[in-house]
Amino acid sequence: MEILIDLISGAVGGNLLGALTKGGGLLKTIMGLLGGGLGNFIGPDILKQIGALAESGQAGQAGVSAGLGGILAMIAGLFNKKKEA
């Protein structure tokens, strides 16, 4: 169940932050999903490093996944923008 929450939050983050760049609607969703999956694996380590693991729980994990999904979608959007120009 946790992986599903992370994938959905990654896709949402990818579409929200990816909206700052043009083009690639499906690409942003896919990159968001990849970021959400990546967040599922490295999210606990990130939260442990900042000392927020005990307090954040699944909400913090979903936030990390959404952030990573958004970052990957923005990067993909920037490359896609250069390719279209």
Image: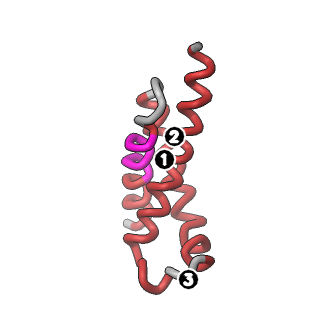
Residue 51, numbered label: 3
Q: Earlier in the sequence, mark 2 or mark 3?
A: 3
Residue at x-position 62% and y-position 21%? 82
Q: Which quadrant holds residue 14?
A: top left
Contact (CB < 8 A) between labels 2 and 1? yes
Label 3 SS = loop
Start and end of the magenta stretch?
10-17
Query: Which sits in the foreground, 70 or 26?
Result: 70
Measuring 41% from the left and 78% from the top, which residue is drawn there?
57
- Find out whether the residues at labels 3 and 1 contact each other: C-beta distance under 8 Å: no
Instruction: Give me the C-alpha separation between circle 2 and circle 3.
Output: 27 Å
Disc number at residue 70? 1
Residue 72's x, y, as percent?
56, 44
The answer to whether residue 43 is above or below residue 80 is: below
Mark-to-mark CA distance, 2 and 1: 5 Å
- 15 in the magenta segment: yes
Tell me the CA gap for discs 3 and 1: 23 Å
Position above or below: 64 against 30: below
Task: Name the element at disc 2.
Answer: helix
Q: Residues within 10 Å of mark 3 (few under 14, many from 20)?
A: few
